[in-house]
Image (cartoon, grey):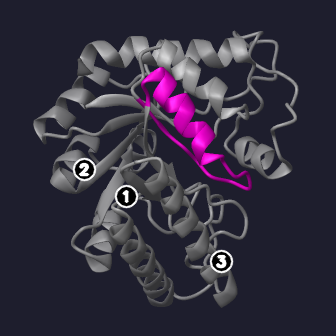
Amino acid sequence: MHLSMHNWMRAEPIEVTIRRLAKYGYESIEIGVGSEKYDIKEVRGYLNETGLRCWGSISLMFTGLDLIQADEAGRANTIQYLKDCITMVKELDGHVMSIVPSEVGKVSAQADPETEWNWAVEGLREVNDFARKAGVVVAIEPLNRFETNFINRHDQALLLAEEVGPDVGVCLDIYHMNQEEASWRQAILNAGDRLFDFHVADNNRMACGQGALNWRDIVGTLKEIGYDGALTVEFVAPIDRTPANPYKNATASAEAELTAEQLKFIEDHGSGVLSEEFYSWLVETTANTLLPLIN
């Protein structure tokens, strides 16, 4: 087991992200792909220089990216987007592609349940065939009911994975599990060797150790099933706009790297543009909480 982190939560040059992770003892990065295109040679250079590796990627299902939308051309565009992400993972010698099947923030159906399910299976089979040839594994991630109306629990994700193919797994996120699962522990045990990725943030979506979750129990349960993948950090710090805000240094003005699409995605998650100082502190706090438990 090792510590990894996403990069979508703060818009900055990927070199800055990689160097920060290396500084605080992270071993890998999970790179989210939006409208930006990464220079693979450049990213590989940063990884080699710092000793980090690419663990994989996650689908950033912005508006219009959705495997279960009614528009056939839109579904085809989503499949191509996922293939492009997988190509990047392959080129960076990564391992896993974590996929949220539906647009994040969409909580209304566009078809009957059977039709949506069939669209998801059909699209994911095509994506998984592509990933298999690239040497990348696919993991289906459930989100909480306020972010998607499709896959919210581990049993739904496992059923979808099974129908897509025997080599498809799941990615579980303890923040979402804490809302949707009757027992996060049982969900991990049920996933077993089909758990390909594990995302972490505290129950308030702050850095690990800044909320109520028992990280010793969580890591212990992962060890119990023999999980040896990444704990991929995905805190999305809420922005407090009241006088009660305990973090006066939390926010910054929007950097040039932040597209309108990215800003909307971050704000839809209840966060905003975080300052370098505050963000680095969250990264360090998470490392201080988790590294003693996994080493």
| Disc 3 crowd, CA 10 A, few/some/many (<14, 14-19, 20+) | some
Residue span colored magenta: 28-52
Q: Can residue 143 be seen?
A: no
Image position of 173 with respect to 190: above or below: above
Name the residue located 81 percent from the left edge and 38 percent from the top edge: 257
Assess whether residue 177 is covered by the magenta stretch.
Answer: no
Q: List x then y, in percent, for residue 227.
A: 20, 40
| Label 2–label 3 contact, CB within 8 A | no
Q: Nearer the observer, disc 2 or disc 3?
A: 3
Q: Quadrant of the N terminus?
A: top left
Q: Nearer the observer, disc 1 or disc 3?
A: 3
Mark 2 vs 3, N-terminal side: 3
Instruction: Say which amino acid is labelled 3.
Output: Asn
Q: Quadrant of the C terminus?
A: top left
Name the residue located 58 percent from the left edge and 54 percent from the top edge: 146
- Res. 75 image quadrant: bottom right
Assess whether residue 43 is covered by the magenta stretch.
Answer: yes
Q: List x then y, in percent, for residue 206.
A: 55, 25
Q: Which element type, helix, strand or loop, lies under badge 3? A: helix
Residue 187 is tagged as: 2
| Label 2–label 1 contact, CB within 8 A | yes
Is 157 left, or right, of 109 in this rendering? left
List the residue tagged with mark 3.
77
Mark 2 vs 1, N-terminal side: 1
Q: List x then y, in percent, for residue 142.
A: 43, 57
Instruction: Say which amino acid is labelled 2.
Output: Ala
List the residue tagged with mark 1.
153
Instruction: Say which amino acid is labelled 1.
Output: Arg
| Disc 1 crowd, CA 10 A, few/some/many (<14, 14-19, 20+) | many
Between the C-alphas of marks 2 and 3, the distance is 32 Å
